[in-house]
Amino acid sequence: MESYFDTLLAPAPLVTGGVLILVALLSMILRPTESFNVPFVGVEDRDMSKMKAKYVHEADKLLREGYDKFQASIFQVMTPDGPRLFLPRSFANELKGYPRHEMSGMKATTDRLLGEYTTIDHESQTGLNSIKIDLNRHLDWTSINLNDKLPRIVAQASALIFVGPALNRNKDWLNCTTTFAADVMIGGEKLKTWKPILRPVAQYFIPEVRRIQSDHAFAHTLLLPVLKSRAEEESRQGEKYAKPNDMIQWIQDRARKSGDKTVDTKEQANLQMLAATAAIHTTRMAVMHAIYDLAARPEYVEPLREEIQNALKMSGGTFTKQCLTQLRRLDSFMKESQRHNPPSIATFQRKALVPVKLSNGFHIPSGTIVQCNTNILEESPPSWGDPLSFDGFRFYKLRSKPEDTNKYQFASPSFDSMQFGLGNDACPGRFFASNQIKIILVYIFRHYDIKFEEGEVGRPKNILFEIAIFTAKTHINGAQEPRLPKVIEDIDVILKVTGSTVCGYNLHLLHSSIVELQKGDILGHEFCGIVDELGSALKNLKKGDRVVARFQIKAMYGVPLGDGNLLKLPDDVPDEKGLFLSDEGDAVAIWGAGPVGQMWAEFSFMNGASRVIMIDHNWRLDFVKEKYPKVESANYSELKGI
């Protein structure tokens, strides 16, 4: 009796089956590529491989040629993915109202990056709403600290909002998210060089694609303890549980509210990786383009620094949402930089999920990806001025009219500015990206002077890969020099610090519990120094004076003021004595009866003070009177002139 294995291994059927499979494979591989009944651009030599290569390296020239030849008409270009339709800008207004289930920007992106293999091929309404609604609602507390590598800076800044303080400084998490973002981009492009029928096998020969699954698994391993710890804490505290203010929590809350059962711990990790991928590359490129443009045009440096200084002064020295909205010149500079160096030279990418008929009668078949040819600077409105020149304050000037004060912003998509898309599929995280870019640039502009490497003349030319624009990698580490402080206000003092002591608060800094210290930072707000430069309004000091700064910050801006905080030191008083502002046997007045004040009271008595007077009010003074009977007290709320 013939067994199953005998039948399976019979030579004739095997050969026949192999032939049929080979024929099927060849028919799919050699099947002519479907095109559309519109003109082609860049097909002069009819060599398919050369046409595709030209799109990879010279897409800007092809799209410019298409615009010059056809302008208001549709044309197509041969790409590594097959023919791609490019529409005039005018069709964006027509298509922007289509719902996502008919014209999808996300589907177009996942197709372009081969999401089936790079794992970015699924949409989560819960995750999307967490970005579109929750992320934009909680922008006030965005803050970052720069490191030496921009991708890591962006990853760390994003992670603070996405996964919270438990992971935003975790080296493994930062490496995982930055590696995943690179693997998706590079792996997808490498896989596209293979025929679609061969990709299921080819994916295993591409290191970046193979690594993507391990990226996901490692991210889940890192995130799982955080999720478990939060679940246990919430269960233990019940209604008293203080929910963290990050995307992990927003996703969980939205999933519970909507009944989305797909959001388990693995999906949380997947959504976090996708969010990081979207943030890291585009934000890094926008920052680098702005840095290059500023280095090429140093005349913008001082006006931008002046605006930053004024905005910080008005906000008390801290970054708030309101503070960032005051940076209109910086916002304009960013927008102009993006106008000349957009993420992509063609925007409004959509995949038709149903047949779509345009107003000119053209039919877009279901499954077709279309884009608008939008990087034509000459199409800018006449009111914008010279479209080809770089005017960093172009949009700042346009916003000077009262009726236009809220228009022309970096994060505001419009028909004339579609870098963030338009309509239903406009980038949901654009407001977060705008604030993040501003904070990074503010830090750089305030602390560094930027210049190109020796021998570099002008702005380095961008690198083009298909329609994506990148900065020149060889110049990404252009020379940067620490910026020396300058007198800005007429009451400013530039001080060369010669000695400093720390208080209890500085221990948080020292142990990295609050912020990461930068190279050159000096701890302590009790310090001595020599006056190096001073403003014209200061009459009680001169250059060369030795001074000590009182530890009480006498300023509404949270920084010492030269006319109120600095006391002259005699030449025979060394720094280590000047820092304590008192000699043995003197009366000591201490403002503030908190823990630090109480320690100073003990310290003063130990060092021979004859009297210690504690200045505070209410229950704090009552506590001091009970615990420290030797200390005299003064209630400042009862004193006149205080």
Image: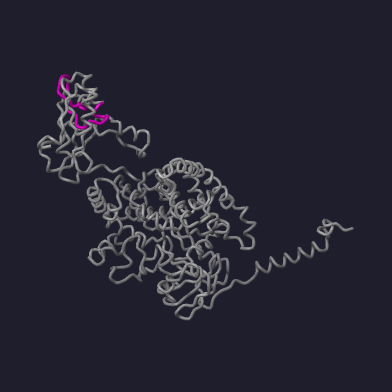
Q: Is residue 289 at all visible to an observer of this figure?
A: no
Give percent across and percent down for residue 583: 17, 22
- The residue most toward the front is 239
In front of the other: 333 or 615: 615
Give percent across and percent down for residue 312: 25, 48
Q: Which residues are magenta?
A: 578-598
The quarter holding residue 239 reads: top left
Q: Is residue 137 left or right of residue 173?
A: left
Rendered image coloring scheme:
one colour
Q: Is residue 342 left or right of residue 84?
A: left
Q: Is residue 5 at all visible to an observer of this figure?
A: yes
Which image quadrant: the N terminus? bottom right
- The residue most toward the bottom is 361
In front of the other: 193 or 398: 398
Q: How many marks?
A: 0
Q: Which residue is drawn at the image coordinates 62% and 72% (left, top)?
A: 32
Residue 585 included in the magenta stretch of the image: yes
Give percent across and percent down for residue 465: 48, 60
Give percent across and percent down for residue 70: 44, 77
In front of the other: 347 or 189: 347
Which image quadrant: the C terminus? top left
In front of the other: 116 or 225: 225
Q: Which residue is drawn at the image coordinates 54% and 48% (left, top)?
A: 215
Residue 464 included in the magenta stretch of the image: no
Task: Give the answer, above or below, for where 619 lies relative to 317.
Answer: above
